[in-house]
Image (cartoon, coloured by chain):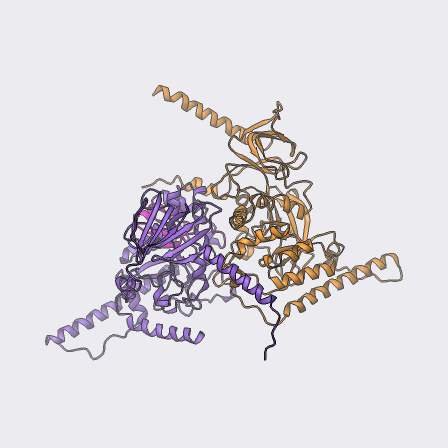
Amino acid sequence: MKKKIILLALIGLLSAAGSLAAAPSATTRKSRTTETSELPVETRLLLKNGHIIPIAGENFDGDILIVGTKIARLGKNLSVEAGTEVIDLKGQWVMPGIIDSHSHIAIEGDVNEMGNLLTPEVDIRDVINPEDINIFYALTGGVTSIHTMHGSANPIGGRGIVLKLRWGADADGLIFEGAPRTVKWALGENPKQSNMGSAGKQRYPKTRMGVEESIRAEFEQAKDYMKSWDVYDRKVREAKTGKGSVPPLPPRKDYRLEVVANILRGKYWVRCHAYQAEEMASIMRLCKEYGVKLAAFEHGLEGYRITNELVDNKVAVSTFADFWAYKWEAYNTMPQSAALMVKRGVLVALNSDDAERMRRLNLDAAKTIRFGGLTELEALKTITINPAIILGVDKFTGTLEAGKDADIAVFNHHPLDPYTVCQMTLVDGKVYFDRAKYLDDRRKAEEAKAAEAAKPKEKKD
Amino acid sequence: MKKTVLPALIVVALTALSFAGRAGDSDARVILIKNATIIPVVGDKIESGQLLIRDGKIAGLGQSLTAPADALIIDAAGQFVYPGFIDAYSHFGLSEISAIGSTSDVREMGKENPELRAAWAINPASVHFGTSRINGTTVALVAPSGGTFPGQSALVRMDGWTVAEMSVKDPATSLINFPMTPRPAGGEGGGARQESKVDVTSKLVDKIKEYLKEARRYLDLKKAAATDSKLKAPAINPKYEALAPVLDGSLPVIISVEKEKDIELAIKFVKDEKLKAIFRGCAQGFKVAQKIKDSGIPVILDSLYVGPTDPEDGYDAPFRNAAELVKAGVMICFSSGDDSTFGKDLPYHAARAVAYGLDHEEAVKALTINPARIFGVEARMGSLEAGKEADLFITTGDPLDARSEVKHLFIGGRHIDMKNYWDNLYEKYKDRPIK
């Protein structure tokens, strides 16, 4: 197993190096159509008699018809052709599969490349661990898609990837085709190594000033780098037309600056870990200055202080319902923060950042009703369509609508009810978690174990 | 236009009145809550009932109480009255911001510190008391952690000017961390830890037994020297002194233990040492529920924000654990656990246990009368009964539901201002002009 992983990681590193020049959307190595064709197109599944929360549109009691991997139709008393598999939900609650826009599961080994200050050359795609049990645990909480990321040790960290939780598939089979690629940045105490005690290196940066400056300096280097390649490429082109000669050597290839150049070209969606309002405001100014696509702040616990600026810059916040006070920069916040940002027009997702919290994002969403007064719909949006928009996958998932992927979570009570238990989770129309079956399997296993224990012991040779 | 002015004025006047009322509430000695659904926990539910508070105590409750002339009246129509929740294990006031050492007094150096007392280090002004009581918690056990003998916990009210004023029982318990592989973590890879093949646990248990033996020898020698002038009394050892009430069974000891095998060893240890024990954690308690029941040892459940100890236990092991223990007859109670910043979530842990099979009524008991009994303060609190301290709250709905809101909280009959650190931030920033 370990050997396989190491090999995979090596191959990953090599392929990362090889693919750097290509556009980041190279993850779509399998097109969505070829992927979906792996399932027989004629697979038809009817989920009937559910309380359906489509997120897009009014709640209704009715059915969902899934054809292949997609939602084909929603409505009351849908008629189906022969051969359609039918699951009677008996009045259970149905919502779009939950999307966790900030996670670190399904990663082999550490999530932080600590060796350097700036490490966009490393890529989570190369170290996806499809065997992480937390993928299954996430499914038991109704989660169908996650964004799994590099850690927050570096001002510019590694690249992240959006996964669909097709438990049992290999690393490639987990990748959410068509999702934009992301890169993790981090501001504040983690890149400053403020809370590492004696383990923290005496390195630059040690201040918020230094953190921002290290990003700016890298941008300037990348601009020089891009220019030197532009000049070289122009000279090569011109030489072909007989004008001048090909330079003796191309500029030195720098895999880190290649990625930074692509960040500047807007090819990566930046996900910036930050807590304090003013450092978020200043990084928004920096991104504007360089034309960088800043998709969202991660955590953003003081985001409620700069909602005007977040709205102006169209920057979302992927945050916690109420996780706080674990360090100084996480102290100046409140559980009303997410709701206040929503009410003031910010696009907000509630995320887990944790394999355990991931299993109860619906219960975290319920807290935004009590703290800050969101409606049920607004609360549910923070774990469905909002993270889908933040991840750039809203045309595929995040609501229950005809034509979207059949990513669905079924609960025995309303998903915001404190006593609700996820009963079934479907990804691309396939059931990946079925609590009834799970309990049945467990009971059988226990019975078999008991029977085995009751048997008189046979002698083994 | 004129028509609308008058009602507006009335509203302003009423608001002013009610604020004046609020300000004086904490001084009111007599308070009548009326029109409420009262859940006394001990005794039957009372619909449209009244509850009278006088001089910090519950003076009475029922359906035919009339308001004394001097009573402040709270109309709780459509609302519910519950006894205050008791958080059975926390670090409130010992840890403000976990990453900042200067704000943390949770863990002392060394392994054997039975003489340390949480009460010496609790900060009554910690914001976590204010934010953790908003869902109805009125009393909490505050404990130090780390090492084999972390020290002694204190049972404190969630309000007070000084620790002495907050104190319900100090010391409330001693503490032992039973030897084991590391506690299951909630984070990545949580629960996937490998168990050691070698039985190191038994050897470590022997070390604890040896330590207790030394303490007993010291106490015996001291006792003997007190009556026999020929014997030399041993030099005072505060650590052994602190274990005296543990060894004679007068002070309960919380034993933190999680795994099936460790729980079995701990039951034997308690029996051998004749301790008055309370287990804490018991993540795999459901596997040995009958044995725990037979031992008579109650269990403080930890935060349910954890993954399974062992993937083999099933993804829902932490949630069904409570129901399984109660089914076997074990007395359980809930706690918010090691994270002092998550006190408000105490009832949410109970809700999760209910979702996975625990009876709702049992869950409420496990937040009220059970911890009161476990800590030996059931004569004073844990239910709504005449003569008990007026620790209670009025809520808009099911107190286990994150969508319910506690409207009034009383601790020792004092009407507690629910405004807290979070509300102050909210009030300020919700009013920033939107461009």
In the rendered image, which quarter is residue B367 located in? top right
- Asked whether B259 or A241 is in front, the reply is B259
Residue B139: percent from left, percent from top: 61, 44
Does the magenta segment cover residue A349?
A: no
Does the magenta segment cover residue A304?
A: yes
Number of numbered discs overlaid on the protein picture: 0
Q: Residue at x 45, y 61 (%)?
A: A134
- Asked whether B43 or B247 is in front, the reply is B43
Residue A372: percent from left, percent from top: 43, 42
Q: Which chain does the purple colour mark?
A: A
- Position of residue A83 in the picture relative to residue B304 (left or right): left
- Position of residue A240 in the picture relative to residue B232 (left or right): left
Query: Could you tell me which quadrant the C terminus of chain A lies in?
Result: bottom right
Residue A343: percent from left, percent from top: 37, 42
- Asked whether A41 or B270 is in front, the reply is A41
- Position of residue A331 in the picture relative to residue A241 (left or right): right
Q: Which chain does the orange colour mark?
A: B
Residue A91: percent from left, percent from top: 41, 45
Q: Residue at x 75, y 60 (%)?
A: B237
Residue A428 visible? yes
In the rendered image, which quarter is residue B12 located in? top left
Query: Could you tell me which quadrant the N terminus of chain A lies in?
Result: bottom left
Q: Residue at x 67, y 68 (%)?
A: B202
Tell me the magenta residue range: A297-326
Q: Residue furthest front?
A: A82
